[in-house]
Image (tube, grey):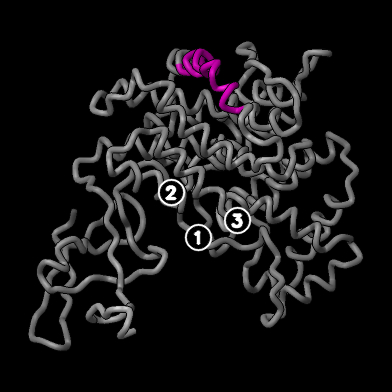
Amino acid sequence: MSNKHVTLNFPDSNQSVELPIITGSMGPPTFDLKTLHKNSGYFTYDSGFAATAACRSAITFIDGGKGVLLYRGYPIEQLAQNSNFVETSYLLLNGELPTKDQYDSFDTEIRYHTMVHEKMKMLMSGFQYDAHPMAMMVGVVGSFAAFYHDWMDMSDPEHRRLAAVRLIAKMPTIAASVYKNSVGQPFVYPRNDLNFTERLLHMMYAVPSEPYEPNPVAAKALDLLFMLHADHEQNASTSTVRLVGSTGANPFACVSAGIASLWGPAHGGANEAVLNMLDEIGDVSNCDKYVAKAKDKSDKFRLMGFGHRVYKNFDPRATIIRKACHEVLNELGVNDPQLELAMKLEEIALKDPYFVEKKLYPNVDFYSGIIYKALGIPKQMFTVMFAIARTVGWVSQWLEQYETADTRIGRPRQVYTGPTTRDYKDFSDR
């Protein structure tokens, strides 16, 4: 914390309050407001917490104006080029890239914990076959606390670390089971001779009646997507995990709450919304018509997957995944009219002066939805794929929160707009 401060003067009195300025290693300076109400009687109002820092974190840094995303200081472009999802997970959890021995040990531990309790199959079978996969994920992950309660002393750092590892390792197993339930096929046990994304693909698509080997193109594309989605600072779902975690709740409850938050179409459901939009447009011949509708402020139609709340220039993840998207479509030889339509929209958005001027470039959700569809992953499973990746960020943030000295239970304030004090009246007087 610096010695600098800002002084607030209040117009209805001669009172003033000095607020310390906090400066991080990167990013804008921040006013420390925790003594404001005590010293002045005022609260602050910030709808959506768009300008409010609720924690200190050393995990992820975003500069939306410059299109920068760093994991523990490493540019996402370098990690996407040189790393993989398991190594990136170690980095987010521990703060440093692993040595070869540390990587092998971590990878082995993840593989060891991929199985889930056998009674989970009974729980899964209780869901309707057409239940939304995210609804199932919320329930099943929350139930982990009933199956793995033997290591839930959150005051013990090793218990916390093991809970994080278990969540990372078991999330793909649960996701694949959710998919199998929806298509009426038997659950497939994890094959620990396969890597992280190969193992997921095998559990999703293998059947007892014939052999299955994961497509390396698909596995590589998923690994890249998982790296790009692993963490993204204090977004809605991560903030939810931290808020629930601030109460001392167990990590499975925290992550289950994060999954529920991620489910929203404005958050993790955005790539599913892209496919819904393509369904509405219907055909390449309709592109110009719908682009015109998107430019018309009086029209309710919106192009999903374009622009980003944080990135005001371009989404660095989209730059990376755009190249991978085209490679996947070419290598798999996918011939899908909807994907052709998506590529046409991309072409328009990158050239049309309206989109260029407003910097409404295709974002990571636009391309990830296209890749998932090309890999044969059903639309309702898109957000589940996101949850697998983001679990790493959630548990990293949850662990960091426990290790931060000034962590307090979350208690946002409000601006009350209801009736002023009034007296109760009997039925006869109403």
Residue 270 occupies quadrant: bottom right
Percent across and percent down for residue 354 are: 70, 75
Q: Residue at x 22, y 80 (%)?
A: 423
**Tag 3: amino acid:** Pro
Disc number placed over residue 233 in the picture, else none: 2
Q: Which residue is mark 3?
A: 265
Please state which of the two labelled residues, at mark 2 or mark 3, is closer to the viewer. Answer: 3
Magenta stretch: includes residue 282: no
Specify which label sits upstream in the sequence, 2 or 1: 2
Q: Residue at x 84, y 34 (%)?
A: 332
Q: Separation of disc 3 and disc 1 at Cα?
A: 17 Å
Q: Residues within 10 Å of mark 1 (few under 14, many from 20)?
A: some
Is most of the magenta stretch helix, strand or loop? Answer: helix
Magenta region: 106-124
Q: Which residue is mark 1?
A: 310
Q: Separation of disc 2 and disc 3 at Cα?
A: 19 Å
Q: Are marks 2 and 3 in contact (CB under 8 Å)?
A: no
Numbered disc total: 3
Percent across and percent down for residue 273 are: 68, 55
Q: Secondary structure at mark 1?
A: loop
